[in-house]
Image (cartoon, rainbow, N blue to C red):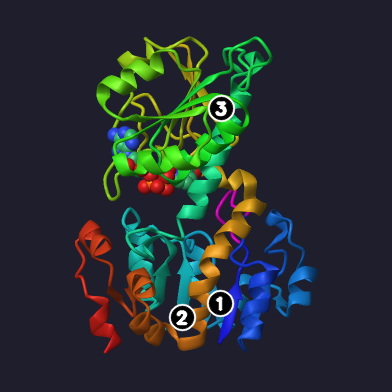
Amino acid sequence: MIVGVPKEIKPNENRVGITPAGVMEFVHHGHEVIIEKNAGVGSGIEDEEYIKAGAKIVNSAKEVFDNAEMVMKVKEPQPVEIEMIKEGQIIYTYLHLAPDRPQTLGLMEKKAVAIAYETIEVDGKLPLLEPMSEVAGKMASIMAAYYLAKPYGGRGVLAGGVTGVHSAKFVVLGGGTAGLNAAKVASGMGASVFVLDINAERLRYLEDVLPKNCQMIMSNKFAIAEEVKDADVVIGTVLIPGARTPRLITRDMLKTMKKGAVIVDVSIDQGGCVETSHPTTHQDPVFEVDGILHYCVANMPGAYARTSTFALTNATLKYGLLIADLGWKEAARQFEPIKKGLNVVLGKVTCKPVAEAHGLEYTPAEELLK
Ligand SMILES: NC(=O)c1ccc[n+]([C@@H]2O[C@H](COP(=O)([O-])OP(=O)(O)OC[C@H]3O[C@@H](n4cnc5c(N)ncnc54)[C@H](O)[C@@H]3O)[C@@H](O)[C@H]2O)c1
């Protein structure tokens, strides 16, 4: 199969859909890889590295779309990219179609085989979303520690304290992938960390894997209100799959918090868990409400593009190889996670939530795999 990787064109997107290691794997499996020139520069990967791994560099995205049987990307295809899609071409990338009707209709009209990273599911988990939550979680504690500094609007508290002086109190709401990683970094800096989750089994697991300067607490309205009062940092990482994030911190609660405390609302991409949150960008990441600094960047991993590219492609490669080796149909027949990834296939919507979101007819993927 010919696998093509164009340069990402969404504003501020520096990730790329494949690394040289990924190229080498595809080539080893007998496939051909074509990559648009300079596709990797945002992630610190030069064309030469791809060439050494066995890829061919082409001059334009058009050449990629004209020749590839499978296009591997990071972000959803932009309108100019949808224009270039060929009938039956596999588009393997993050799609997020439920809130995006024009893209859904575009992929249907082009009769693409669109496989979404975010709906590939294994044992109830989403392995192609997890690496980005790891990046965002680790980054949340770094950003919080930075903005705690006085010149940036914070309380002037050093996360880990020093001899004879209290360390900062970090409260992490949600102990899933992002929460665990936020707690790892905060505890590594020497902060006092409190992780709240509603899942007792998860709390028990966190108790086992996190160090002694982390305490696990059952999450409920009372506990959250108590814990945030004397927090220097609150990191919001709660998620209820398929639903809007619950607003666990109300505006009234901000008034009970210490001035100059920092909130990092990682869950902002699902609406945020703080009433006063609104999405921000890397160019203008923070704002203040009632003396509390809010950091609410909706695409945090974009800041660490190189790490994020390698983390993402580590997760996407396995399924990409199966699709290339077997073809999309046979790969989806044999592997349930790939079947779950099918969102739009040859003009039909094969992902129920996407069909429901847009009032379009839903066709179970099985019907197209016969
Ligand atoms: N801003 C960004 O750039 C960025 C990047 C990656 C992920 N995210 C977002 O981060 C969020 C977390 O992702 P994740 O992969 O860690 O999810 P996850 O499913 O692994 O973890 C969510 C946790 O929240 C817990 N939870 C649910 N309701 C709760 C409540 N009331 N109180 C306390 N805990 C509660 C769940 O039990 C679960 O353990 C998601 O919204 C995700 O989209 C944002």
Direction from residue 332 to residue 164 in the image, left or right: right
Residue occupying the point 58% across, 65% down: 17
Q: Amino acid at mark 3?
A: Ala
Image quarter for ligand 1 equals top left
**Is there CB contact under 8 Å for labels 1 and 2?**
yes
- Image mark for residue 144: 3
Query: Is label 3 in a helix, a strand or a loop?
Result: helix
| Above/below status of 165 relative to 159 | above
Mark 3 burial class by Cα count in 10 Å: few <14, some 14-19, many 20+: many
Which residue is labeled 2 in the image? Answer: 89
Q: Is residue 306 above or below residue 47?
A: above
Quadrant in which the C terminus appears? bottom left
Work out how far the residue at label 2 is from the one at label 3, CA to CA, in angstroms: 43 Å
Range shown magenta = 8-14
Instruction: Tell me the SS state at disc 2.
Output: loop
Amino acid beneath label 1: Phe
Residue 59 picture location, percent across and down: 71, 73
Query: Of the residues under marks 1 and 2, which one precedes in the sequence?
Result: 1
- Name the residue rendered at 55%, 38% in the picture: 184
Of 320 and 66, nearer the camera is 320
Residue drawn at (56%, 27%), measured in percent from left and top? 144
**Quarter of the view holding residue 329:** bottom left
- Residue, disc 1: 65
- Name the residue at 34% across, 65% down: 104
| Few, some or many residues within 10 Å of mark 2 (<14, 14–19, 20+) | many
